[in-house]
Amino acid sequence: MGSLLANKNILVMGVRNKWSIAWGIVESALKEGANIIITYQSEREKKGALELGGHSTFQCDISSDQDIDNLFHAIKEKYGVIHGLVHSIAHANTEDLQNDFIYTSREGFSHALDVSAYSLVAVSRRAKDLMSEGGSIITLTYMGSEKVFPGYNVMGVAKAALEASVRYLAHDLGPLGIRVNAISAGPIKTLSAKGVKDFGNILDTVEVKSPLRRNITQDDLGKSSLYFLSDLSSGLTGEVIHIDSGFHIMGI
Ligand SMILES: NC(=O)c1ccc[n+]([C@@H]2O[C@H](COP(=O)([O-])OP(=O)(O)OC[C@H]3O[C@@H](n4cnc5c(N)ncnc54)[C@H](O)[C@@H]3O)[C@@H](O)[C@H]2O)c1
């Protein structure tokens, strides 16, 4: 066990089950001595989050300001201070990931943007008050924000908004010693990913065409997150870094 995150309280939002990217991050952070606080969305996800073992867990639906306020109030009472926040949450309506993008409804567009992008702004605003010793905020994005991946659709638009939010938040929070960055992850089989049409094709393409000739793993993301969450990245903020076997550099 290392000590990169010893005595650091890290809030991880978005653990659904053991396949979640957020869970890979938790496992790596635990090995480096972090105290982990996990949130789950609702009673439906509670069992999965609790099964993963002895961490502090809180319910929080990120589309509810009341839930977010309650969460940060409870964390303040129990911990006083946090040093890291992992935002690993996104959602779009199933039909908006199955139909062509042009058919996205007004409601579907706002839902995807609210849960997947605005939520980072909402939690960062509350987190800053608990990051009195400085801190690191990370979120998870995907290359569908930069290029068209048919089927990723409104989620690509939401990820573009998320990445722009990272830069504006980095500017606002920098003077407080709080850094904000995004990991642009390669495709990984998770429950959320299953909702994207032809996701299997995306995985196959990365395996064949990426410089590393393989898909990334939860462990790759977990280890990389240690850099973002720890002092190792003390000069880095406002950045979107691809952890994707190098796929994003390819033209063909
Ligand atoms: N899996 C991939 O290929 C991939 C690639 C790049 C980026 N990402 C991003 O990684 C993040 C995590 O996704 P994942 O692939 O681990 O899937 P996942 O299904 O395991 O995690 C998604 C999480 O979002 C939570 N969530 C959704 N709506 C919520 C709400 N209203 N309130 C609170 N929580 C809510 C779910 O409960 C779940 O815990 C997402 O932002 C996703 O877009 C995933």
Image: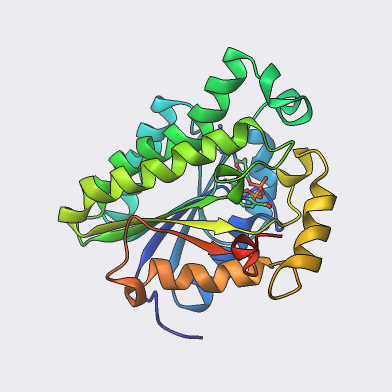
Is residue 127 among what the camera can see?
Answer: no
Colour pattern: rainbow
Direction from residue 220 to residue 113 in the image, left or right: left
Q: Quadrant of the C terminus?
A: bottom right
* Residue pictured at 69% horizontal, 49% vertical: 48
Is 68 placed left or right of 193 in the picture? left
Residue found at the very far bottom of the displayed protein: 1
Query: What is the x, y in percent for residue 161?
Result: 45, 36
Q: Please provide percent x and percent y for residue 10.
A: 41, 60
How far across and down, in percent of the image, does residue 75 sit?
35, 47
Q: Nearer the viewer, residue 40 or 210?
A: 210
Camera-side residue of 193 and 215: 215
Residue drawn 69% across the image and 45% down it: 47
Residue 232 in view (yes/no)? yes
Relative to 139, is 251 on the left or the right?
Answer: right
Residue 133 horizontal/vertical position (percent): 20, 62
